[in-house]
Image: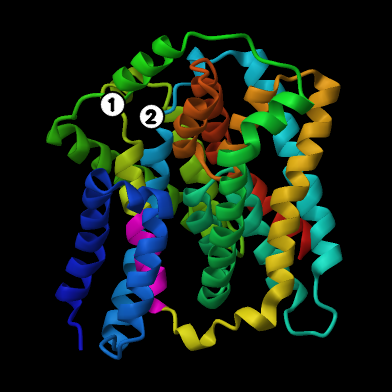
Amino acid sequence: MLSTSITVLYLFAVPLGVMLLARKWSFINKISPMMVLYVIGLAVGNSGIIDTTAFATGEMVSNITVLIAIPLMLICCDFKGWSTKNVAKAFFSGLASVLIVILAGFFIFRPSDGSLSTDDYAKVSAVMTGIYTGGIPNIGAISKAVALPNNLYLLVTSYDLIITGLYLVFVIFFGKVVFRRLLPPAKAVDETDFDDSLQKGNGTSRGWWKKVAAVGLALVVAAVAYGVSMVVPVGNSVAVIIVVLTTLSLVLSFCRPVKRLGNTFDLGLYFVYVFCLSIATMVNIHDIKLLENLHILCYIAFTVFGSLVLQILLAKLLKIDGDTVLVSSIALINSPPFVPMVAAILKNRDVVIVGIAIGLLGYAIGNYLGIGIYYLLR
């Protein structure tokens, strides 16, 4: 059986190893480091070496890492340097599309046989809202805020990987042609200039002291959020923690001393990967009844592709160019790290900042929307 110390070492070392290997082996990024960690977690968790103590350790690690990840991913945002008009049109049209489809899908695909309670289905809708208006960080945050059962968490994220994987294939092979044919064209750009900007955008390594300081700041923010939750008299203290955590992180993103810490996004992503491995390790694979919950798979597919169709229709009305709509869609559905890849497919340097801006705005507002959707639908 795994002891507490070995469990902690496993949960923090394996994600770091996967991230380092992803830099050398591109196929890991293609299939997603998160998917690799899910497979590892499920294999270890169902091997018989996880006992009650290790399970409790994993639960504690998942609770802590998600609270550290949110500030790290938000404090590096730079809201002041973006093209406000272009970002606003694309972001709000994409946001409206996702919310309308999720609300419609809740009533269309909610099972009538009692296999899943209305409250649990509202939790599923809340997490989906976080996924498709934000990304990976919002999955962990909202699932904790609404107390989504671990088996449903893994079920939703597993289905999500399947559907968003199909969506990514569509974007890679057909997105450029489809979006540019259906929507107004973007202005022409210099492909050489685009390639140069990506090389410069990869950045230089940051000092270790900055990483330590960033983690320390995230811990302080988490502690303040926890303190506020102890004072505010509401039933769901976790929801208060997440909302306060997100708000404080956004405020800090405008502070110059915090900006000097550099890009903390990848560091935050590491803690999200630790969270994912913890969750996967704690789930018994025999409890995941994929074939008995196909209504959730249909709900997710309806949300991803239905919101895409609705976003294109809204973009036609708002006269948003195809390149901007495509990167905004990929930023909301698959998260900002996919934006540079899509920009490379489009050979359009100008959409990089727009796509990342929309994705980061989604991270910022996704927690609020997800929790709000839960209380609306429950």
Q: How far apart are marks 2 and 1 (CA)?
A: 7 Å
Q: Which of marks 2 and 1 is nearer the N terminus?
A: 2
Residue at point 45%, 13% (across, down): 191
Q: Residue 214: where, in percent of width, then height?
A: 26, 37
In the rendering, at what x and y percent does residue 150 appear?
51, 74
**Marks 2,1: beta carbons within 8 A:** yes
Residue type marked 1: Gly
Amino acid type at mark 2: Cys
Q: Residue at label 2? A: 76
The residue beneath circle 1 is 262
* SS at badge 2: loop
Specify the segment rendered in magenta. Answer: 273-282
Residue 365 sits in quarter: top right
Q: Residue at x 45, y 30 (%)?
A: 340
Q: Which of 85 and 323 is in front in this view?
A: 323
The location of residue 88, given as percent across then percent down, is 67, 22
Quadrant containing the N terminus in the rendered view = bottom left
